[in-house]
Amino acid sequence: MEYKISARASGVTPSLTLAIDAKAKQLKAEGLDVVGFGAGEPDFDTPQHIKEAAWKALSSGFTKYTPSSGLLALRQAVVEKFKKDNGIEFEPNQIIISNGGKHACFNAIMATCQKNDEVIIPSPYWVSYPEMVKIADAIPVFVQTTEEEEFKITPEKLEKAITPRTRLLILNSPNNPTGTVYSADELKALGEVCIKHGILIMSDEIYEKLVYDNTAYTSIASISPEIKAHTIIVHGLSKAYSMTGWRIGIIAAPLPIAKVIAAVQSHSTSNPVSFAQMGAIEALTGPQDHLSVWIQEYSRRRSYAWKKLSSIPGISCVNAKGAFYLFPNISKTGFKSVEFAARLLEEERVAVVPGIAFGSDDNVRISYAISMEQIIKGLDRIEHFCKRIVG
């Protein structure tokens, strides 16, 4: 039988980051010694007090439906988080708890974009942004950034990319895959361009807590009431609390947009997992002691990886200020990213994600959310590979 697939679905490209991670795990399961730099999740366990809160809820029978936008107590905890951490005031009805950060992004795009709307995406970008835009029948418009700009879109480049059909700018700071963090002044300048042209901003802030070298983190919505009125914040607990499998995402939006997103979610997934929400309340309101420990360790790994990568023939690398990725340039090896990654996996048993998945074929992404032992082993293998092919 010939099955007819919708044009919307057939135009979507599977996630290359998930594919690489799955391939590395498959090879490990076959008994091969593979170093996997592809993971986009912490190697630390979820803090114990969070797990205990969820277990208590589960064991007490808290296993039924909740309001589709999430428990009021959890939405109130999110309101308090934004007030305390970012100086931003929200009401609980402006908050939607989604099924993970990815779902938060998807909901925001589906609620605001329609056929032939244009969405500006600075490149390099997280792999799922353009695919979500395409699912919404909108058009991704990529704005290339450079290493000299620390992979940041400038107000001038943003202004040049805007057309009468532009609906949304997607910002991600700290950034996946580059680790870039925008300053308050840089965000203010971008926000003012969006106000001038009546463009919404989707600000993906899921790596907010993971910044290094005393880098100050600013949410773009905190800069002014006018910019806040143009901003949808998408967030989640996956990265700062190692809750990737819990699937708890966060949306904070102007009320008219929040109402639409709530309606969309009510007819698609409905509520996130009930007992996971109880764990999320504990994550936001309970002890935060783990963060300083994790950040110190990530910073140690990042410093080692950046220095090592910068010393390898054929590779240059901009140091990251946040998240847990580096995005080394491999163009001087003579390979583009897919061939580089394929040969590296085949010949050295090291898995990296080709930069083409993020819009830059001269780079690969390396996650340092793995043990230092694995980082040292993997980078030594990359050095051996590059010395062999570059000389």
Image (cartoon, rainbow, N blue to C red):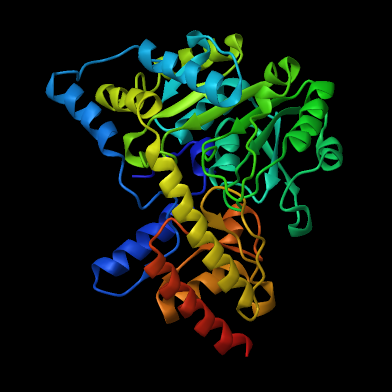
Percent across and percent down for residue 374 are 39, 68
Q: Position of residue 67 (x, y in %)?
A: 34, 11
Tell me if residue 7 comes above or below residue 16 in the rendering. above
Using the rendered image of the protein, determine whether residue 366 is visible from the camera's viewpoint: no
Quadrant housing residue 269: top left
User: Number of marks in the image?
Assistant: 0
Residue 267 visible: yes
Residue at point 24%, 27% (across, down): 53
In the image shown, does 6 or 131 lie closer to the viewer?
A: 131
> Compared with residue 243, is residue 86 higher up or lower down, i.e. above or below?
above
Whole-percent x, y for residue 357 in the image: 57, 55
Between residues 73 and 231, which one lies in front from this camera angle? 73
Q: Tell me if 163 is positioned left or right of 328 in this view.
A: right
Residue found 54% across the figure and 55% down from its top? 325
Instruction: List x then y, in percent, for residue 260.
Output: 54, 13
Q: Quadrant of the C terminus?
A: bottom right
